[in-house]
Amino acid sequence: MAKFADNFEGWYKYAERAAGRPPRPLLVEAVTLASGRDAALDIGAGALNDTIHLLGAGFAHVTALDGEPIAQQIADTLPADRFSYVISRFEDFPFPPATYDLLNAQYALPFIRPDQFDRVFAAMLASLKPGALFTGQLFGDRDDWAGTPSMTFHTRAAAEALLAPLTLLSFREEDDPDSQTLNGTAKHWHLYHFLARRD
């Protein structure tokens, strides 16, 4: 069984391996559907690959939110007038209401603590403008990391209920017991990929 260790060194090594990789496919799809491009929030921005894609796609301002400054060197090269690098726990970030045209949370939402998840997720939804898009993943209850006290996991029914306030444009369950993490560790991935719109 794969194990998850939440520490700066582990996240920094992840960012090193992820640097320069293409943007996540769900984000690419979301960008093509975005009706507004004033502001985007990249939640769990990691190596900033998705952030760079959002800037290149013409968003006027992109905020990259991460718990650790693992991509500070890359952040320092991005345009200061269009980009903000915010180092904060997701639980502590003050999601401003009705602000964002797109929320991108690739493999990030499960790292919200269970006792804070509902509050933080509701704040994320409230930060979407009407017509804005939200894309990311929720981890399923059969994932190898399920049971990690600091992480949140969902059954399919719970995931669908959580997204019910939005219009789902796509929802795909992935249950792969023979996969691995980016660093090559064997892992059973169980997750729900979603792309949704706030009407």
Image: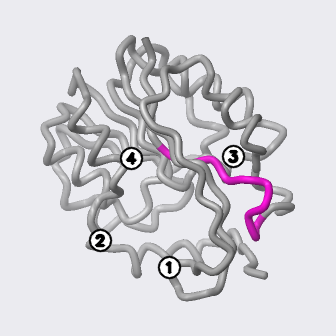
Q: Quadrant of residue 178?
A: bottom right
Q: Which residue is mark 1?
A: 182
Assign a secondary structure to mark 1.
Answer: loop
Q: Earlier in the sequence, mark 4 or mark 3?
A: 4
Q: CB under 8 Å between callouts 1 and 2? A: no
Pinpoint residue 173: horizontal percent, then vertical percent: 60, 51
Magenta stretch encompasses residue 141: yes
Q: CB under 8 Å between callouts 3 and 1? A: no
In the image, 45 versus 24, the foreground residue is 24
Q: How is the image coloured?
A: one colour
- Residue density around tag 3, few if under 14, some if 14–19, many if 20 or more, within 10 Å: some
Assign a secondary structure to mark 2.
Answer: loop
- Residue 39 versus residue 153 in the image, above or below: above
Q: Which residue is mark 2?
A: 21
Give how far apart the Cα atoms at labels 1 and 2 are: 11 Å
Pinpoint residue 86: horizontal percent, then vertical percent: 44, 46
Give how far apart the Cα atoms at labels 4 and 3 are: 16 Å
The structure residue drawn at horizontal position 29% and vertical position 59%, both measured from the top left corner, is: 23
Is residue 76 left or right of 41 when viewed as pictured? Answer: left
Is residue 99 left or right of 82 when viewed as pictured? Answer: right
Q: Earlier in the sequence, mark 2 or mark 3?
A: 2
Q: Earlier in the sequence, mark 4 or mark 2?
A: 2
Q: Quadrant of residue 98?
A: top left
Q: Which residue is mark 4?
A: 64
Pinpoint residue 151: horizontal percent, then vertical percent: 76, 54
The structure residue drawn at horizontal position 40% and vertical position 44%, both measured from the top left corner, is: 42
**Kind of residue sitting beneath label 3:** Ile
Which region is colored magenta?
136-145
Assign a secondary structure to mark 3.
Answer: loop
Give how far apart the Cα atoms at labels 4 and 2 are: 17 Å
